Image (tube, grey):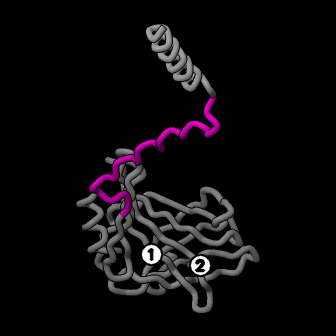
Amino acid sequence: MMYRSVVLLASLVAATAAFAQQKPSSTPPAPPPPPAAAPISAEPTSTTASFGDWVLRCQKVEAVRACEVGQSITVQGQSGPIAQLAIGRPAPKEKLRLTIVLPNNVTLTAPVRLGTGEKADQGLSLAWRRCLTVGCFADNELPDDQLRRYRMTSEPGRLVFQDGAGRELALPFSFNGLAQALDALARES
């Protein structure tokens, strides 16, 4: 009889354990752990360096590093720049290009002119390429002789364009630091 009691008790314990394992849990299963964060590179994704009034900006997207030198032209009393100039290569091995961004209120039939001192008429002429909500873009390849002249000048620069009403406007900018910024750009390319 004792043997039967022990067998019955063992069967009862086994059945209870099996039932407990089959009983649905009242607490939801734990969520899976979050995916591991992507490793952070020891190399920066973007850098800037100032050279006088010019800034060298480099940005790495995937495996490609693109750099340009630029200057923002501001007007007293305005929070953002009224114009921006940038010199860079659209792709490795291509010649340098000068890009200018101006507000949308410009005359697109008149090119943007860039020069030194009061001689913007004898400087570089840039064709308009497109207008977006952020502004209108003009650009041109930067000829070697013009680039040498800009690198060596100590005179102030002039950016001349026509606004939407056809009035000619001239914005001053500086060549101070351009030669050093272009040298740094050449090392980055």
Residue appearing at x 31%, y 52% in the figure: 41
Compared across the picture, whether 49 is left or right of 14 comes to left
CB under 8 Å between callouts 1 and 2?
no
Q: Is residue 154 above or below residue 45?
A: below
In the image, farthest residue toward the front: 1
Quadrant location, the C terminus: bottom left
Count neighbours of disc 1 (C-alpha within 10 A) and say few if under 14, some if 14 to 19, many if 20 or more. many
Question: Residue 88 sits in which quadrant?
Answer: bottom left
In the image, farthest residue toward the right: 165
Q: Which residue is mark 2?
A: 82
Residue 42 picture location, percent across and down: 27, 56
Residue 143 magenta-drawn? no
Residue appearing at x 33%, y 62% in the figure: 144
Residue appearing at x 32%, y 72% in the figure: 49
Question: Residue 68 sits in which quadrant?
Answer: bottom left
Closest to the observer, 158 or 78:
78
Q: Earlier in the sequence, mark 1 or mark 2?
A: 1
- Judged from the image, the secondary structure of the residue bearing numbered disc 1 is strand
- Judged from the image, the secondary structure of the residue bearing numbered disc 2 is loop
Mark 2: which amino acid?
Ile
Q: Is residue 141 above or below residue 102?
A: above
Mark 1: which amino acid?
Gln
Residue 83 picture location, percent across and down: 56, 75
In the image, farthest residue toward the bottom: 76
Compared across the picture, whether 48 is left or right of 135 comes to left
Task: Write down the region rendered in magenta.
Answer: 24-46
Q: Is residue 59 above or below residue 52?
A: above
Residue 120 picture location, percent across and down: 50, 78
Circle number at residue 71: 1
